[in-house]
Image: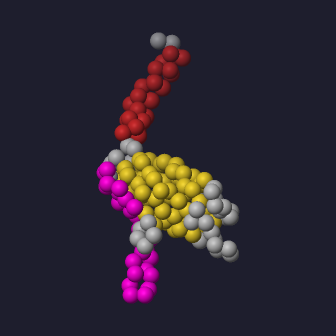
Amino acid sequence: MNPTMMKTFNSLVFLIIFLFPFFVYGEEFSISTKNNLILELRPGQKVTAGFMDITVSENVNIIKIESKLIGNIEAHSMIMDGEIMKMRKIKPELKKNIEYKFQPGGDHLMFYNVSEKLKKGDNINLLFTFELKNQKRLSKSIQFKVK
């Protein structure tokens, strides 16, 4: 083999051995969502909440949520203790084929330092990073509507 063919062959072997497993695994992992919404900002506020129903094809943890339009996004759990609302940051564990609900009065998404005024009817993409059981990470863009 000449040097050019050898480089091409080595490149193909690298792709097959190292990258193919990621593509195969990525195709097996699927996500379905519904009721994806972000509450419209109140006047003068830079904080709002979001909700969604999500089902995944493998056990995963949500480890990060990002958007170019929002400074910080966290998943929170909310409980009422008498008349006091208590929230804490969580890293949701999603179970295979079981719907997980981010909803008012329970687990939900919090959006801090919203850089642009979100208008009712806008569509916003959020990038979710999931960690699978084998510690591989996958990212998926999910669209939300501002209500």
Most common SS among magenta residues: strand
For the magenta stretch, what is the residue range? 76-101
**Is residue 97 inside the magenta stretch?**
yes
Residue at 39%, 87% in the rendered image: 82
Q: Pinpoint residue 16: horizontal percent, then vertical percent.
A: 41, 28
Question: How many numbered circles does the render carry?
Answer: 0
Q: Pinpoint residue 111: horizontal percent, then vertical percent.
A: 56, 66
Look at the picture and state if 99 lies above or below 40.
Answer: above
Residue at 41%, 71% in the rendered image: 106
Residue at 63%, 69% in the rendered image: 41
**Is residue 29 inside the magenta stretch?**
no
Q: Quadrant of the C terminus?
A: bottom right
Residue 25 in sight in this render = no
Look at the picture and state if 84 lies above or below 127.
Answer: below
Q: Quadrant of residue 122?
A: bottom right
Nearer-the-camera pick, 65 or 2 = 65
Nearer-the-camera pick, 48 or 23 = 48
Q: Residue furthest top?
A: 1
Q: Quadrant of residue 121?
A: bottom right
Nearer-the-camera pick, 35 or 47 = 35
Residue at 59%, 71% in the rendered image: 47
